Amino acid sequence: MPSSEQANPLPFNDPAHWDKMVATYEAQSQPFTTHFAEAAVAMLPIGPSSKVLDVATGTGAAALAVARRGADVTAIDFSAGMVARVRAHEVANIEARQMDGQALDLPDAAFDAAVSVFGVMLFPDWRAGLREMARVTRSGGSAAIAVWKSADGAAVHLLLAQIIRRLYPDNVTPMPCTGLAELADPGRLAVAVVAAGFADPVVVEVTHDFKLNVANPTEVDRLFEFMPHWSGLDAEQSAAVARAFRSEIERGRIGDTFTIPSTALIATALRP
Ligand SMILES: C[S@@+](CC[C@H](N)C(=O)[O-])C[C@H]1O[C@@H](n2cnc3c(N)ncnc32)[C@H](O)[C@@H]1O
């Protein structure tokens, strides 16, 4: 693994960060990621007798989509808080377990299908995450992996990056997730999926609107607390970006909603 993939300063790689985010994630992000999770799960040939793994399940968007098809789901996440939230859904055919997606505590070839929606791309060793998905998928099984089409991610991250690129093109700090940048390309995503042990990859684009509730300006300001794009800016530049962000929202809002279209790449592939 290249050393750049080991040192990752983002809170995304700290389970404690995600533990704190459970309620916010469920309220603001899961309704949005569910669209992509539904699309990814619909691409898998699964039904009531299938065993399916959801890697980095979060609050369970993909696990719930799989469970609605009657399949048995193992939903894993390294955040104890996320795992507890999925267990609290009390869905009989979902078993939620806390584990690292880069080193799954699961046997080889145990699943008919594996899915990861905006999960593996965040791992410091995202290649290991993909390899682990292949290892636990049986021969003839399949996988679906959803990533963002932009290295800037989606939703508020994407909007903020666009504003900073416009105002200070030399000061954009790239998202320090190597997987996010590397996999944000259909060709590279297909190559990575094959390198992990899958075959016959097919990559499609799926776009949905992120609907930001802008009723409360303080909440809007809090949104970019964790944004890596801030770190390359001085105080004056940060203030200018915040002003541009607010005026973009004022111009584009419809009532209390500001819409940010975001595009994912979803790769499906077979396990030889
Ligand atoms: C952006 S959320 C995606 C959640 C869900 N799949 C969805 O689409 O809504 C990323 C999730 O990855 C989990 N995660 C990050 N690194 C992980 C790792 N190394 N192993 C397992 N889970 C991880 C986080 O705890 C978080 O729940």
Image (tube, rainbow, N blue to C red):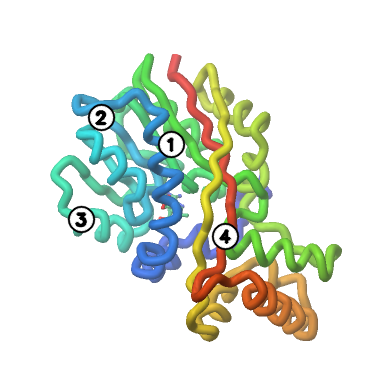
CA neighbours of label 4 inside 10 A, class few (<14), some (14 to 19), many (20+): many
* Local SS, label 1: helix
The quarter holding residue 142 reads top left
Q: Quadrant of residue 30?
A: bottom left
Tell me the tag on residue 155: 4
Real-space CA distance between mark 2 and mark 4, rounded to the nearest whole angstrom = 32 Å
Sequence order check, earlier mark of 4 and 3:
3
Residues under numbered marks 3 and 1 in contact, where contact means CB atoms less than 8 Å apart: no
The answer to whether one can see residue 125 in this image is: no
Task: Return the residue nearer the eye: 77 or 203.
Answer: 203
**Residue occupying the point 32% across, 36% down:** 53
2 vs 1, front mark: 1
Disc 1 target residue:
40
- Residue bearing the label numbered 2: 51
Which amino acid lies under the numbered mark 2 shown in the image of this protein?
Lys
Name the quarter where the N terminus is drawn: top right
Asked if the beta carbon under badge 2 is closer than 8 A to the nearest atom of ligand 1, the reply is no
Residue 32 horizontal/vertical position (percent): 44, 55
Answer left or right for 143 relative to 185: left
Mark 3–mark 1 distance (CA, rounded to whole Å): 21 Å
Mark nearer the viewer, 4 or 3: 4
Structural distance between the alpha carbons of marks 2 and 3: 19 Å
Check disc 3 and give the amino acid type.
His
Q: Which amino acid does label 1 sit on?
A: Ala
Does the residue tagged 3 have its C-beta within 8 Å of any atom of ligand 1? Answer: no
Q: Can residue 173 be seen in this view?
A: yes
Query: Earlier along the polypeptide chain: callout 2 or callout 3?
Result: 2
Query: Which mark is first along the chain, 4 or 2?
Result: 2
> Cβ–Cβ below 8 Å for labels 2 and 4?
no
Disc 3: which residue: 89
The residues bearing labels 1 and 4 have C-alpha atoms spaced at a distance of 19 Å
Q: Quadrant of residue 243?
A: bottom right
